[in-house]
Image (cartoon, rainbow, N blue to C red):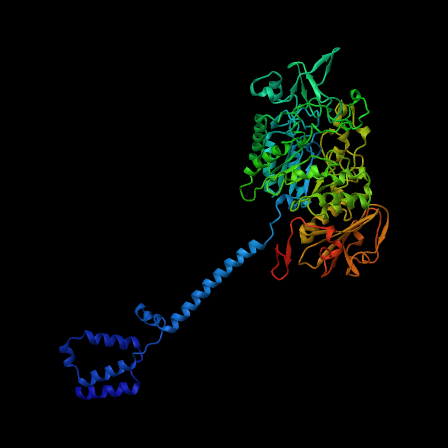
Amino acid sequence: MVEEAAKSLPMELSEKGGVENNGFVQNEAFDDKETDASSQEGMPKACAVAVEAVAEEETVLKPYAGMPKEVLLQFSSQARYRVTREILFWLIIAAAVALVCATIAIIALSPKCLDWWQASPIYQIYPRSFKDSNMDGDGDLKGIQEKLDHITYLNIKTVWITSFFKSPLKDLGYGAEDFYDIDPIFGSMRDFESLIAAIHDRGLKVIMDLIPNHTSDKHRWFQLSRNRTGKYTDYYIWQDCRQAAGSVIPPNNWVSVFGNSSWQFDDVRKQCYFHQFGKEQPDLNFRSPAVQQEIYDIMKFWLNKGIDGFSFSSLKFLLEATHLRDEPQVNKSQNGVIITAYSQLYHDYTTTQVGMHDIVRSFRQTMNEFSREPGRYRFMGSGDDEKEDIEATMMYYGTTFIQEADFPFNFNLINMKNLSGNSIFEAVDLWMKNMPVGKWPNWAVGSPNAARISSRIGKQYVNVMNMLLLTLPGTPVTYYGEEIGMENIASENVSEEHVNSDPVVVTLPEKSPMQWDGNINAGFTEGNSSWLPVNSNYQSVNVEVQMTQSNSTLNLYRELMLLRNSELPINRGWMCYIWNDSNVFVYVRELDGLDRVFMMVLNFGQESTIDLRAIVPNLPSEAVVRLSTNFSNAGKAVSTKLIKTEMGEGLVLEYKTTKPVHTMETFQDKCFVAEKACYSMALNLLYMNC
C-alpha cells in the first residue's frame, strides 16, 4: 500500500502542475537540508526525486507584496532596477541645482523692492490742529490715535508728526525746552508710547521732526551755559559785545531769519549769544563734540521708543564761520547801519559752511545703527528749503558712496510764484534734471509754513494738484486737510492772544483745526472752543460729508491712491514729458515690458484743446479716461487728436502701445526713472536688465 501511494504521488503533482507557493517550495527545500541523513534514507526514493524536480522548476522568483528583506535584496542588485534608481537620483540632483540657480538668478535680476518710505505717501500732521481728545481746545497725541482710521482709509502708510517736544511754544514748538519730553499740551510720554504702538499695530510707520540747530532759551543747557557751568560753557555761541552810548553793538552785521541782529546780549553772562531765528532760540555750538554727542543721544532715545525716522530741519544753519566777518550786502550802496532784513545780505558765513555735511552724515550713521534689523529701516529726510539754490538742496542726498538724507524735502510746487502749465513743468523738471542718478524724488503741495492750495492758487485747482501729486514719480507728501480741500482761515480771525509778538504767527491761517464733520467746531473738539478758529466752511468741507459724495475731493484722492498702488507704471515706472504750455502739462507713466501706458493731461490755466497725436508718433487714435477730476468722464473713450480740458481739470488716460515714449529718440532727454524695473508678462515678475 505504501509503495502504491509513493508511486502515485509524482503522478498527482505532475498532473496539478507542481506546487504554486514559491515560499512553500523554498521552505520545503530548506527543510530538506536540515533533515538528517538517516531520515532521508528512510524516505521513499520516488517521493524525494519528485519534490526536487518541482523545486528546480520554481527557482526563478518574481517580486511579490510582503517580500522579506532577503528576497528584496536579490532584486535590488539586478541591473534594470539599479539604472532606474541612478537616473532618478541624478534627475533629482539636477532639478535641485536648477531650482537653486533659478532662485539666485531671480534674486540677482530682480530690482530692489521699494522701501516703506518710497511705496506710500507721507501724511503730515500738525498735532495741535488735528484732533482734541480732552476738550481743552488743543489737538494732542491721543487725538491722533483716535483718528488713525482716517489714515488707513486714505491708503496711506506713513505718518509725519511735526514737533511735539516740551517747549514754551513761542515759535509754535520749534525751540525745544526738553528734547526728552512731550509738551503737556500734547499729552504725556505714555500717550506717545500708546500712539506708536497703535500706529505699528496698523502696519503704519511714523516719522517726527527734529531741529538740532537751536534750543529754547529755557533749556537747561542754556541756563548752565549762561552761568559758565562746566562743559556747558561752550554749548552755545558766545561773543563779547561792545557797549556804546548805553546800547549794545553786536560783533558783526549778521541778521536773523526773522530780521534784526542775530546777536542778543545776556545780562547773566555779560556776552552776546548768536541766534539764527528768534532771540528765544539760541543756536547750539556744533563745533563742540559734546554738543554733537548730545544730539546723537537724543536721536537714539526716540529711535529706541520706536520712531521710524526723522525729518531734520534747519541743517544749513548748523555751522557759522569762526572769523565773524560781516556778510556781503545785496545792495552795496546801501548804508550798512540800516540793514535789518534777512534778504538784504548774502549769507555766505552763516549757512552751509564747510563741515556741515559731515555732521549730517554723522546723523545718517546714527540712523543706520538702528536700520540693521530686517524690515526696520530708519528714514532720514532734510527739510531745508534752499529755494533758488537747487544744487545746494541736492547735496543733502549725499554722494554715491556716502549717504545723507534719503531725500531732501521738495518744496518746488509750493514756491511757484504763479500757476500755469509751464510753471508746473518747470518746477517738476528743475528737480528731476538736478537729482543725482539713482536717487528718489518727492513732492509736496502743502506744509505748515505755506498757505493751503485753495488759498494759494484757488479752490478750482485743488483736485488737479492732488492728481499731479499722486501720479508723479517718487514720494508724495500730503499736509493734513489737503485731501478734503481745506482753506486758510481769514487772518482777522486770529485773535490778539494768538498773535502777541511772535514773528511766525503769519503761518497760523494754514494751521486751522482739521474739519472732521458738520458738528460744532467741525468735530475737532467737544470743548467750547479751539485754539484757533475753525474755518467757516466746515459744514460743507469736512471728512464725513465728503465720504458720502462720489465726486468729492476726498473720494478722488482715494481713487488716485488706489490707482497708484495697483498700477506698476505709476508706482515705479518711467515719466516722460509730452507737452506743456500756459494751460496744460502732459506727461506719461510707463514701464518696460508692459504695453499699458498712463497719460496725465492736467490743466492749470484756462480751457484748452490739444492734439496729442501730432506730438507723439504712433499714439493710438483713442484712449480711455481712467480717472478724471470730473467723475462723469471716467470710463469714456476720447480721441487723442482732440483732448479738451476745462480750467482745473485733470485726466488720467489709459491706452495700449508697443512703442512706449521713453524708447523714442524724440523724447530721450525728457524721460526719467528713479528705480528702474522691467516687467515680464510670461513670468509675472519684475527684473532689472532690460
Number of numbered labels in the structure image: 0
Percent position (x, y) of residue 324? Answer: 68, 23
On-image quarter of the N terminus: bottom left
Which corner quadrant of the image does residue 13 belong to? bottom left
Quadrant in which residue 481 is drawn: top right
Above or below for 53 versus 609: below
Viewer-closest of 412 and 44: 412
In the rendered image, which quarter contains the C terminus? bottom right
- Which residue is pictured at 72% across the width and 47% down the height? 472
Q: Is residue 223 above or below residue 449?
A: above
Is residue 468 left or right of 371 when viewed as pictured?
right
Which x, y percent locates residue 138?
Answer: 70, 29
Which quadrant of the figure has residue 478? top right
Residue furthest left in the image: 38
Q: Residue furthest top?
A: 245
The residue located at (71%, 12%) in the rendering is 243
* Above or below: residue 684 compared with residue 290: below
Query: Which of the pair 624/523 is nearer the observer?
Result: 624
Q: Return the x and y of residue 377 as percentages of the image width and height.
A: 58, 42
Asked whether the viewer can see residue 615, the reply is yes
On the question of residue 146 being in view, the answer is no
Image position, residue 582 (x, y; %): 84, 46
